[in-house]
Image (cartoon, rainbow, N blue to C red):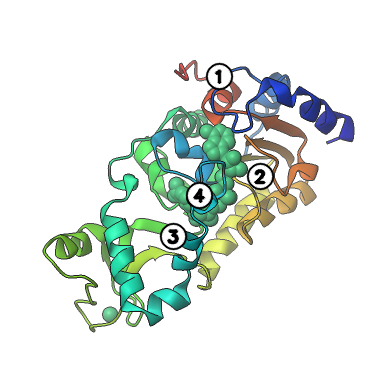
Amino acid sequence: MDRGHQERHQDGHRENSTSGMTNRELPEDVAAARAAIAGAERVVVLTGAGISTDSGIPDFRGPNGVWTKNPAAEKASNIEYYLADPEVRAAAWQSRLASPAWTATPNVGHRAIVELERRGSLHGVVTQNIDGLHQLAGNDPDKVIEVHGTVWFTRCWDCDDRRPMSEALDRVRAGERDPACMVCGGIVKSDTISFGQQLVPQVIDRAMAVSDECDVMLAVGSTLSVFPAANCVPLAKASGAEVIIVNAEPTAMDHHADWLLRGDIGAILPALVETGLNPD
Ligand code: NAD
Ligand code: ZN
């Protein structure tokens, strides 16, 4: 991507609100990026929390993000606090009970990625999201690489027992404040990667492998500041892929973008894959 490109977008920023959420106008480079996707045999889509905000799940670092509004919430997502303090766990279970993920439905952004799969050009979806909405939208679960895990299952910290989240939530509803593992009595948490927790090496390896193999890397709704997931972008670029970044705000990887599409995911993604879906 040449600098002139980026500057043009910065100049054109007045067209988009800071969040990009209210403006349905398409950035001028959408047509060129669409052509790159149409000509690609292996597209990898890297998604972050921004693709799910239209489904009612807030992101962390956007203008209305959970951490932007309440910096203390970031601390509660840390594994050390979770393991050390039963009160932190009790609060976490209450917040899981109230999670918007249980009732959220996929939006046009998720459906545009399903359209790529239907066409046969989707090589993989590397998602930082834990909400399961790509699978719910209809992507083949084998194509979805969840680098930060999923809220739909629990895992025991001690014995690794994994089971559906609904079982633990039923126990919380029935009065348990911090439901212990049914197998070993250990500490149970959602099967997600908390801050301070090790990633799953096989999952990260797969994410890096598909990124290395793709000819277009489409990064959507992420600040691209969480590693190693964000590394998918420079890795794909170094392997010769074209990079398209769709986000309302600047990201840490904008300098790698061949096309930087700043604006509303719900407007841009359907346009990129020509699904003809009405974003409204
Ligand atoms: P982030 O919160 O750091 O960034 C999200 C980005 O998306 C922001 O730059 C924001 O401006 C942009 N955005 C939000 N809605 C948008 C829209 N409709 N159109 C265009 N841009 C939009 O997200 P991240 O980089 O994915 O990192 C957050 C971490 O937290 C992830 O690692 C993930 O594990 C976790 N998380 C997941 C979910 C989820 O599963 N839905 C939600 C919150 C956080
Ligand atoms: Zn256990």
Residue 274: mark: 1
Estimate the spatial distance between the alpha carbons at disc 3 and disc 1, rounded to whole Å: 30 Å
Q: Quadrant of the N terminus?
A: top right
Cα distance between the residues tagged 3 and 4? 24 Å
The residue drawn where x is 34% and y is 82% is 158
Q: Looking at numbered disc 4 in the image, what kind of residue is underneath it? A: Lys
Between the C-alphas of marks 2 and 3, the distance is 22 Å
Left or right? Give the position of 227 relative to 145.
Answer: right
Q: Nearer the viewer, residue 30 or 93?
A: 93
Q: Dot 1: what SS?
A: loop
Mark 3 in CB contact with mark 4 (< 8 angstroms):
no
Depth-wise, is mark 3 or mark 1 nearer the camera?
A: 3
**Badge 4, how many Cα within 10 Å: few under 14, some, many 20+?**
few
Mark closer to the chain start, 2 or 3: 3
- In the displayed structure, 180 sits above or below 243; it is below
Q: CA distance from mark 2 to mark 1?
A: 20 Å
Looking at the rendered structure, the kind of residue marked 1 is Glu
Kindly give the residue lying farthest to the left in the view shown.
174
Q: CA distance from mark 4 to mark 1?
A: 35 Å
At 59% across and 63% down in the image, what residue appears? 205
Q: Is residue 205 above or below residue 35?
A: below
Q: Nearer the viewer, mark 4 or mark 1?
A: 4
Residue identified by numbered label 2:
214
Label 3 within 8 A of ligand 1 by Cβ: no
Residue type indicated by callout 3: Gly
Q: Amino acid at mark 2?
A: Cys
2 or 3: mark nearer the eye: 3
